[in-house]
Image (cartoon, helix red, strand yellow):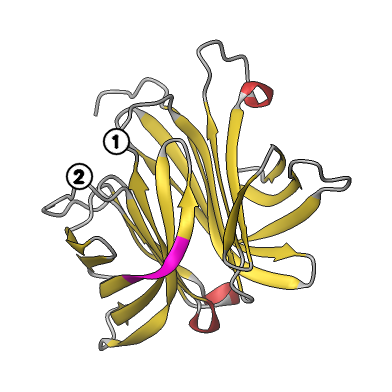
Amino acid sequence: MNSIQSVPLLEAESLAFFEPEKGVYGIAGPQVSVMFTGKGDAQTLAFSVSDVQQLTTLGSNKWQAQMQSMNGAFDLDWKSRGHGAHLDSSEVIVCDVTGRVSENGKRDRRFSSFGVSTLPSRKPGPPVLRSISAVFENGDAFFLNAYKPAVYHGHGDERNDAVIIEDGKAQTVADARLSTVFSKDDLHTQASLELWLHEDDFPRRITGEAIPGTHVELTDRDVALGFYNWTMGPHSGIGYYEIALAAPPRRAA
């Protein structure tokens, strides 16, 4: 992985940005920063690093992040749209994102799209193993965290914490059932969810297909990150699906 000087922000967990019409997808965070550019067969990983160069809080509803590498860079601002979701371990906020992006060493160009800001809760909790964000074109959104319980035998033992936003109102999901399809290189390529709200006779269904994806190796865990096209009923959306597992022992270099 690339190595850069870091000025991490402890308050912000991650800042995601999506520009689907131009094929730009990324996340800036104090531990993982990734950006993909291009479409289809021309899609490339601009960078995948363990630290963001600079990540700053500008207020209660504004954030800023900058990243520079040989293959890509960005200087972006996130501003809350005024709605989001409170999960046990984090607060997730839908944002407008503006600024500058450079791809494959080309000149900077203007970026104007949307994204998600994830702020960690101030109360400690169990590790988050899976995290999903989906923002739909009609303004609805869905967020999920799956936690590792004290006694853990596998994926079926995870405890889900999920919120769906419909017509600007956040509703807690009583039961979220997640199924995932993996490729031969252990990247998740498809996902489907059944969301049961209280007193619902039928679940809401969300399906997703990965656009690009990558693995990032950290000291204590391995992260598989995929950006996704999501569908819920007649509505399409963009977001990501992240899986974090305990890292195997590393061999000495």
User: Which structural element holds mark 1?
Assistant: loop
- Using residue 66 as the reference point, say whether residue 127 is left or right of it: right
Mark 1: which amino acid? Arg
Mark 2: which amino acid? Leu
- In the image, residue 65 sits, relative to residue 19, either above or below, namely above
- In the image, residue 219 sits, relative to residue 178, either above or below, namely above
Q: Percent position (x, y) of residue 186?
A: 60, 40
Q: Percent position (x, y) of residue 166?
A: 64, 63
For the record, the magenta segment spans 79-83
- In the image, residue 134 sits, relative to residue 147, either above or below, namely below
User: Of all residues shown, which one is farthest toward the top?
Assistant: 151
Decide which of tag 1 and tag 2 comes sooner along the chain: 2
Which of 200/186 is in front? Answer: 200
- Please give the residue where the numbered disc 2 appears in the rendered image: 10
Magenta-span inclusion, residue 241? no
Q: Percent position (x, y) of residue 103?
A: 34, 79
Occupied quadrant, residue 176: top right
Mark 2: few/some/many CA within 10 Å (<14, 14-19, 20+): few
If the image is split into quadrants, where does the C terminus sit?
top left
> At 59% from the left edge and 43% from the top edge, which residue is drawn?
162
> At 41% from the left edge and 68% from the top edge, which residue is drawn?
82
Q: Percent position (x, y) of residue 80?
A: 36, 68
Q: CA distance from mark 1 to mark 2?
A: 11 Å
For residue 227, say whether it is visible. Answer: no
- Using residue 226 as the reference point, say whether residue 251 is left or right of it: left
The chief SS type of the magenta part is strand
Residue 122 is tagged as 1
Occupied quadrant, residue 151: top right
Residue 104 is tagged as none
Q: Are marks 1 and 2 in contact (CB under 8 Å)?
A: no
